Amino acid sequence: MSLGRRLENLDNGTNNAQDNVDKENQEQLYGLFLTAAAQPLKAKTDLPAWSAAMDAGLEAMQKYGKAAPGDRTMLDSLWAAGQELQAWKSPGANLQILIKAVESAEAAAEATRNMEAGAGRASYISSARLDQPDPGAVAAAAILRAILEVLQSQDA
């Protein structure tokens, strides 16, 4: 299955007004992330460049999204993955690092269940609705998982 099709399947089809606003905000943040991440990849596309791309994307998300790791947002899972991807800057790096990064992102997304919201949608909705992991963090981890699965299928 292609990456596009996998990502398409992540949309759960919610249609209420607040979900649509939140989806637009997430799309803008992903746009910022991807625009910044693209810059290091213009010159090289080796693993260290991909690590630098993740760093650039995370920096842009923090700067313009005004969130930090631990704020119960999509940044939590992306940050955890980014920490693992630092190993791509070392010689001998391989796809195993991405596997660890995805696992870290998924664990960080689950950990948002126990966090107090400091930014994002969770910071202004009823605390009674905060008994689940942050949806943005879960979505970011799912995107990383989809990328991993596509890369693994290409390796096979």
Image (cartoon, rainbow, N blue to C red):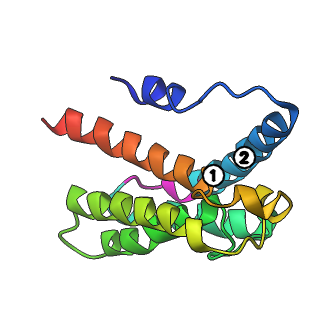
| Horizontal arrangement in the rendering, residue 114 relative to residue 18 (left or right) | left
Location of mark 1 (residue):
136
Query: How many angstroms separate mark 2 from mark 1 (CA)?
Result: 7 Å
> In the image, is residue 64 above or below residue 31?
below
Front-lying residue, 121 or 33: 121
- Position in image of residue 118 (x %, y %): 77, 73
What residue is at 76 percent from the left and 45 percent from the top?
Answer: 28
Q: Nearer the viewer, residue 58 or 79?
A: 79
Disc 2 and disc 1 in contact, CB within 8 angstroms = yes
Q: Nearer the viewer, mark 2 or mark 1?
A: 1
| Furthest residue in direction front, as rendered | 128
Is the residue marked by circle 2 packed among few (<14), some (14-19), or many (20+) residues within 10 Å?
some
Q: Earlier in the sequence, mark 2 or mark 1?
A: 2
Element under disc 2: helix
Three-letter amino acid code at the position of disc 2? Gln
Amino acid type for the residue under numbered disc 1: Gly
Q: Secondary structure at mark 1?
A: helix
Residue at which label 2 appears: 26
- Magenta segment boundaries in residue numbering: 39-45
